[in-house]
Structure formats: C-alpha cells, structure tokens
C-alpha cells in the first residue's frame, strides 16, 4: 500500500508540473559598465553606455526556471597615447538558472546564477591581450506582473570577466536594466 501511495504522489507531482510550466521572452534596455581600462592617460574606457538585451526562458515551477540571454553592452571610444586610441564594444550570451520568490500576487524577487560567454571587439589601436572570456553571471532583481502573461522586470547583472589586458589588468562588465516579459 505504501508503494502505491508513493507512486501516486510522485506521478501527481510530475503531472502537475506541466500545468504551471510556461515559456517566455523579453526585451530590456538599460545601462552597462565595462571597467578595467584604467591605464594612465587613457580616457573613455570606464564609461557607462546603453545596454540592450533579449532573453527567453522556461519557468518550470513558480520558483525555478532557466533562461538564455544576449546583451549588447555598447561601444566605447578610447583616447590616449597612440597605442591606445580607438574603440571597443562588448556583448554577452548567457545561460542561467533562475529563482523567483513571490511576495504578493503581482510582485516577486528574482535571482540568476549561470555562465556568460563574454566578447570584446576592438578597432583602432586598442589592444586587448585576451578577449572572449567566460564568466560567472550573477543577477538580482524584482518583477511585477500586470497580467498572467505580461510583466516588467528591474535587474542588476554582473557578467564577470570580459578580457585580460596586455598590462595584466582584468576587464569586467555589469549592467542595470528594465524589461518587459511576455509569457506564453
């Protein structure tokens, strides 16, 4: 009898999971910061620029999900000695597990932990020792649901290591964003 009850409970749990499970997509705008271009006489590297991101995911339960995201971190112009004049742009592609803590019927807190494939593209005489790094993605935020399918999110994300410069310093990136999410 105990085995029948256990099998019934487990089967019910797995059968109920798809009832809640839902996919979603989102689009966000914000501000990114890439830091680490702080050599003497170099200007423009450590500046805030616009951030645009698109993401999609799958919410498996009310508390746990998985998400894929691409973010364009903007372009920065650098001026300084001839060896460091030019520009660079950054982007990231990530896969993360998400956690949601519902507080009220419409308001919830969010957390993300995952891996981010980070890329720096340079032009001119900007020299990056080794770009295209993989970093740990950490994120925290809040969401408000207007309807069961439409919500807004405010987030802070740390994308981790972007590059190592020839002088040994490291380049890191983070960003703040506001986005709309559509669940289907």
Image (cartoon, rainbow, N blue to C red):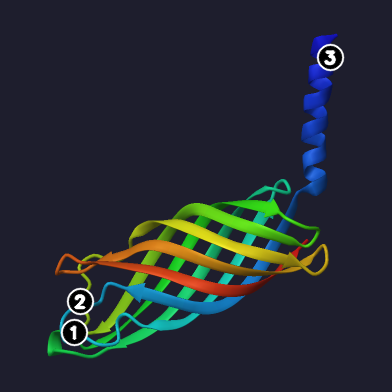
Query: Residue 90, percent across and down?
Result: 39, 74
Q: Is residue 172 left or right of residue 92?
A: left
Instruction: Estimate the x, y position of residue 115 in percent, counting from the top left.
Output: 45, 54
Report the number of discs.
Answer: 3
Return the x and y of residue 164 as percentages of the image width and height.
24, 65
- Mark 2 closeness class: few <14, some 14–19, many ≥20 residues within 10 Å: some
Quarter of the image that includes the C terminus: bottom right
Q: Quadrant of the N terminus?
A: top right
Which residue is tagged 2? 127
The reply to whether the C-beta atoms of the residues labelled 2 and 1 are less than 8 Å apart is yes
Query: Vertical placement of 116 versus 4: above or below?
Result: below
Local SS, label 2: loop
Closer to viewer: mark 2 or mark 3: 3
Residue at image mark 3:
4
* Residue in front for this viewpoint, 118 or 79: 79
Q: Which residue is mark 1?
A: 84
């Amino acid at each position: 009898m105990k085995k029948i009850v256990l099998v019934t409970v487990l089967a019910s749990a797995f059968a109920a999971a798809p009832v809640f499970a839902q996919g979603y997509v989102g689009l966000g705008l914000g501000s990114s910061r890439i830091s680490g271009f702080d050599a003497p006489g170099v200007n423009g590297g450590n500046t805030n620029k616009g951030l645009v991101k698109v993401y999609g995911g799958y919410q498996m339960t009310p508390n746990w999900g998985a998400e894929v995201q691409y973010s364009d971190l903007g372009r920065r112009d650098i001026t300084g000695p001839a060896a460091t004049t030019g520009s660079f742009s950054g982007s990231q592609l990530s896969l993360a597990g998400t956690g949601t803590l519902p507080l009220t019927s419409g308001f919830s807190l969010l957390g993300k932990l995952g891996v981010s494939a980070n890329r720096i593209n340079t032009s001119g005489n900007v020299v990056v020792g080794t770009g295209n790094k993989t970093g740990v993605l950490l994120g925290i935020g809040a969401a408000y649901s207007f309807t069961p399918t439409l919500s807004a999110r405010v987030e802070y994300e740390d994308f981790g290591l972007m590059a190592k410069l020839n002088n040994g310093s490291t380049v890191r990136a983070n960003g703040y964003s506001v986005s709309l999410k559509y669940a289907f």
